[in-house]
Image (cartoon, rainbow, N blue to C red):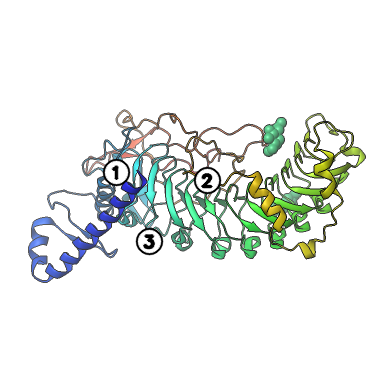
Amino acid sequence: MKAICCLLFLSVFSIISLRSLSLSLNKAYTAAITRRHLGQAKLTDGFEINIDARLNFPNPRLKKAYYALQEWKKVILSDPEKMIKNWEGIDVCSYNGVFCAKAPDDPNSMTVAGIDLNHGDIAGHLVPHLGLLTDLSIFHINSNRFCGIIPDSFTKLTILHELDVSNNRFVGPFPNVVLKMPKLKYLDIRYNNFEGELPPQLFDKDLDAIFLNNNRFSSVIPENIGNSKASVIVLANNDFKGCIPKSIGQMTKLDEVIFADNELSGCLPDELGLLENITILDVSENNFVGTIPEGFGKLKGVEMIDIRKNELTGTVLEGICTLPKLLNFTFSDNYFNQLEPKCEKPVRPELVMDYRENCLPKKPDQKSEKKCEPVVNREIDCESVGCKSQVDSDEESKKKKPPKKPTPVPKPKPPPVPTPAKPKPPPVPAPAKPKPPPVPTPAKPKPPPVQSPPPPVFSPPPPTQSPPPPPVPSPPPFDDIVLPPEVGYSYPSPPPPIFPGY
Ligand SMILES: *[C@@H]1O[C@H](CO)[C@@H](O)[C@H](O)[C@H]1NC(C)=O
Ligand SMILES: *[C@@H]1O[C@H](CO)[C@@H](O)[C@H](O)[C@H]1NC(C)=O
């Protein structure tokens, strides 16, 4: 299936390049004729647009959009939910999943400001022509079956604020094209098959939320992670190696950080204690050694600390067990052999602590003496441990862990990570003020509740980390449409609110 998809992907590329080749060869003498017959418009974006001249578009932006969307539609191989069934005709603003608003630089022109095809289960790929949608501020296609890569032409999307391609079948290295989107605030590429290294430039960008979890990234975490102003960073379920960079301590805006289930190693940096505004800190399922940094006792706002499944040793500190906001402190499956008195049992009824699978003398469900003995008395010098996985723990973890991702990521896997908290609402180009609806709302049904795969979702801050949040920003049904008298097309209301709850 994947092979077919990618073959198609390649052949579409070659069709495009063949077409542009023949266009340039013939251009000299056919251009005039072609223009007369087809109303061909040469656009600055490197695409020749062939559209029947008899089609009458309200403005050139919508004409470009029509061309881009029709080209995209051509490569859609499966659309079981009939998401794009009504992508016919020149009124692109009435297409399902396409949202129009007044152009940010021209209030007299409507333009395509958002695409939201979340949960479509659509198979296909992204065509370069989508780069023609230069007024897009939102591009959401989560929970589909798009494969291939994110085209370079996406660099033309210079006002894009949100890119959500999560839960698809994208492959290849980190999509560097996102680094060239100056307005991007929300980057969600989780649940794909991206691999290789993370570019350090990612953390110099002014992003508010970065979701990279459930891919195949395998580099170290770039040292400059501390430059990021993001409030949410999720790196879980990849193969990241090395230490957590000490620069992390600079991230005073950080609300939630999840390093779970990687191959990270070394000691936990004391600098984690500088994250004054963190509510969720999850370093579980890695190869960390040494003791819990005392700095953790300064995390006054933290609600959840998960250090489960590492090789941490020593004493569980009172400073942590008594943190004022703490609700869930999970330190199971380590090698702790001592509890300070106030850690013996939760100090508040709402606090949950998981003691299991340690080396604690008086607690139930502990590791065997045989397992504990060689580790609990191991002297760990964090300096000399460095950031390389220890050979033995590496080998042990290979034995412990089944080889990662032997098969393509199974879709139905629910996102294991708590979803983000409080990304700031990014500025959006002023959407058109909806006028009173002259006609009944055209049926733009919400995507049906997803069939099988509970998709990764982006949702508003859970008050505590407990309830898995409700499904994704799906486009709200339109409550208004506008009929511009001069054309008679109906324009649906502006793009859906970006972060629900705001
Ligand atoms: C972090 O929280 C404190 C209050 O606990 C607040 O004064 C400070 O402004 C916050 N920092 C940031 C960067 O939001
Ligand atoms: C506490 O956190 C752990 C690890 O994230 C999770 O498995 C557990 O369900 C949580 N417990 C409660 C009561 O929220």
Say the numbered circle drawn on residue 152: 3
Front position among marks 3 and 2? 2
Residue 337 at what x, y percent from top left? 87, 43
Name the residue at 54% across, 61% down.
Answer: 197
> In which quadrant of this rendering is ligand 2 seen?
top right
The answer to whether 284 appears left or right of 411 in the picture is right
Residue 59 vs residue 483, the one in the foreground = 59
Q: Earlier in the sequence, mark 3 or mark 1?
A: 1
Q: Is residue 280 visible?
A: yes
Helix, strand or loop at disc 2?
Answer: loop
Name the residue at 60% across, 41% down.
Answer: 417
Farthest bottom residue in view: 28
Residue 502 at what x, y percent from top left? 55, 41
Residue 365 vs residue 350, the one in the foreground = 365
Helix, strand or loop at disc 3?
Answer: helix
Say the numbered circle drawn on residue 405: 2
Q: Residues within 10 Å of mark 3 (few under 14, many from 20)?
A: some
Say the numbered circle drawn on residue 9: none
Q: Quadrant of residue 479?
A: top left
Amino acid at pointer 2? Lys
* Residue that carries the numbered disc 1 in the rendered image: 76
Q: Is residue 253 visible?
A: no
Distance from disc 1 to disc 2, alpha carbons, whole Å, reads 27 Å
Amino acid at pointer 1? Ile
Q: Earlier in the sequence, mark 1 or mark 2?
A: 1
Residues under numbered marks 3 and 1 in contact, where contact means CB atoms less than 8 Å apart: no
